[in-house]
Image: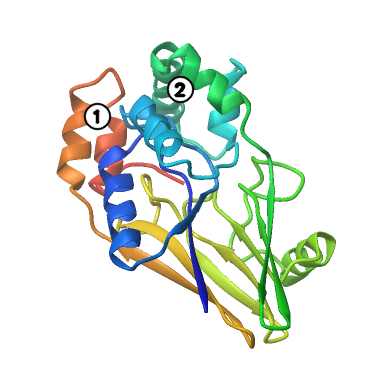
Amino acid sequence: MIQIAVFSDIHGNLPALDAVLDDIERKGIQQKFCLGDLIDFAPWGNGVIEKIKTLNIPCLMGNHDERVAFDISVAPLAKHSEEETNARFIAIDHSKKHITQENKRFLSALPFHLKLNYKIGKRHWNIQLVHSSLSSNDTYLYESENDEVFAEMLKESQSDIMVMGHTHLSFKKCFDHTSWAVNCGSVGRSKEENRLASYLIITMNEDQVIPEIIQIPYPLEETVRGIEESGIPDYYAAFLKNEKISVL
């Protein structure tokens, strides 16, 4: 049996990342992979990057990582309210000003996709890791998406399981009892009602691959206080507390 852990969308939330890494260690899982979006919305972007670097965790380039690494301009999103649009501009600008040049270089060199192959007995398992899709790191694929979209991605990547993040909403979809499309959710900015830190454990043996979504609490008030004491809009503190704000 082989187990690996996959997580995504930390968004500068170091207390949440620490909780997830501690939980993975308690479970005795040694191999860890990150799907990107290390920065924006909580104030520890540099700390998150340094931890990923220090622990040598393979990591993909999320859309927020790319935007800050290459100073890409921010465009408003139609789905966002005026309040969220304004907060988003300020939060991303905060990252552009505070992420160190060394860490921006690290973000700029992250890979776009990662394909893993594990051999157990006579069976090879292929695992495709993406931030959001095969062709983009900024495509929103939800559980409600037509099954054919995920089936085609699995076929194109020739994988048994495809793992993505980006939407901050976890799900598992099984196809033909043998292949999976999984969203591992978000470590640091979950859009699920419970606001727990989410990650994925993949268990493989010769006969099957089993994805399990794990959701755990973390010191949320520490993150809320960190946001409120930084130059990041309090909008994101209210979001984490699940207060009534207009968020999609």
Q: Mark 1 points at which residue?
A: 227
Question: In screen coordinates, is 14 left or right of 59?
Answer: left
Q: Which residue lies furthest to the right in this view?
A: 156
Q: Name the residue under label 2.
A: 92
Question: In screen coordinates, is 225 left or right of 103?
Answer: left
Q: Name the residue nearer the viewer: 105 or 63.
A: 105
Q: Which amino acid does label 2 sit on?
A: Ile
> x, y (%) of residue 80?
49, 36
Task: Count every numbered label the image shows and give the total.
Answer: 2
* Residue 193 visible in the shown view: no
> x, y (%) of residue 218?
22, 52
Gap between marks 2 and 1 measured at Cα: 13 Å
Dot 2 and dot 1 residues touching (CB under 8 Å): no
**Sequence order check, earlier mark of 2 and 1:** 2
At a point 55% along the width and 71% down the height, the residue shown is 172
Q: Is mark 2 on a helix, strand or loop?
A: helix
